[in-house]
Amino acid sequence: MPGAVPSLGDGRGNALDALIRIAGGKPLGCARDQGRCRTRLERCYTSAVPTTKPRYTVTDAGHLAEMLDAAGRRWPEVSDRRQLLLRLAEEGHHALAGADLARDASERRDRIAQALERIPGLVDTAPLLADEAWT
């Protein structure tokens, strides 16, 4: 049938080859035949996904793996490491927002203290405190 999308199990290769065909690229069966990792594609297979947002690829290794392990101990009810990564990002956002609020409050207190220090030089309080001001 013209315009039909090949199924992922169509017998012409693996699922990645089928996705590459859907996006209009050429499958790279030779890399599979030689037993190597297929990390180079002729065309981005995600071009059919409608988004202008950037995508990020991270590997669960090193410091990230340690952070995810710690998150798993903190939230044992979450077993999916992807969900743990999202929870870590959300907690980091909350921590940054809290730090911003604390910084803003500190700056506000500093401005108030500076204003209170300047007031005596701006106002002559002697006439206000004298009895003549009230008569």
Image (cartoon, helix red, strand yellow):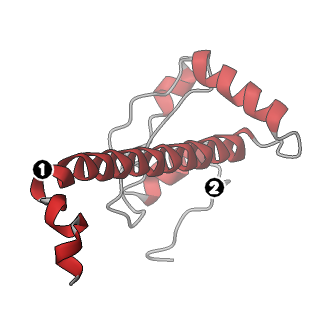
The percent position of residue 119, horizontal first and vertical second, equals 19, 55
Residue occupying the point 13% across, 60% down: 123
How would you rate the neighbour count of disc 1 (Cα within 10 Å): few for under 14, some for 14-19, many for 20 or more? few
Which of disc 1 and disc 2 is earlier in sequence? 2
- Three-letter amino acid code at the position of disc 1: Gly
Label count reads 2
From the viewer's perspective, tell me whether residue 122 is left or right of residue 19: left
Specify the quadrant that holds the C terminus: bottom left
Is residue 27 or residue 2 the one in the foreground? 27
Number of the label disc, if any, that sits on residue 121: 1
- 3D distance between C-alphas at marks 2 and 1: 80 Å
Q: Of helix, strand and loop, which one carries label 1?
A: helix
Number of the label disc, if any, that sits on residue 8: 2
Is residue 111 or residue 18 the one in the foreground? 111
Tell me the mark number nearer the camera, choosing from 2 and 1.
1
Residue occupying the point 52% across, 68% down: 5
**Residue 66 visible, this angle:** yes
Residue occupying the point 83% across, 31% down: 73
From the viewer's perspective, tell me whether residue 19 is left or right of residue 14: left
The percent position of residue 25, horizontal first and vertical second, equals 36, 49
Q: Are marks 2 and 1 in contact (CB under 8 Å)?
A: no
Residue occupying the point 75% across, 26% down: 69
Vertical arrangement, residue 18 with respect to residue 81, above or below:
below
- Three-letter amino acid code at the position of disc 2: Leu
Number of the label disc, if any, that sits on residue 103: none
Is residue 116 or residue 83 the one in the foreground? 116
Vertical arrangement, residue 5 with respect to residue 30, above or below:
below
Is residue 94 or residue 43 the one in the foreground? 94
Splitting the image into 4 quarters, where does residue 71 fall?
top right
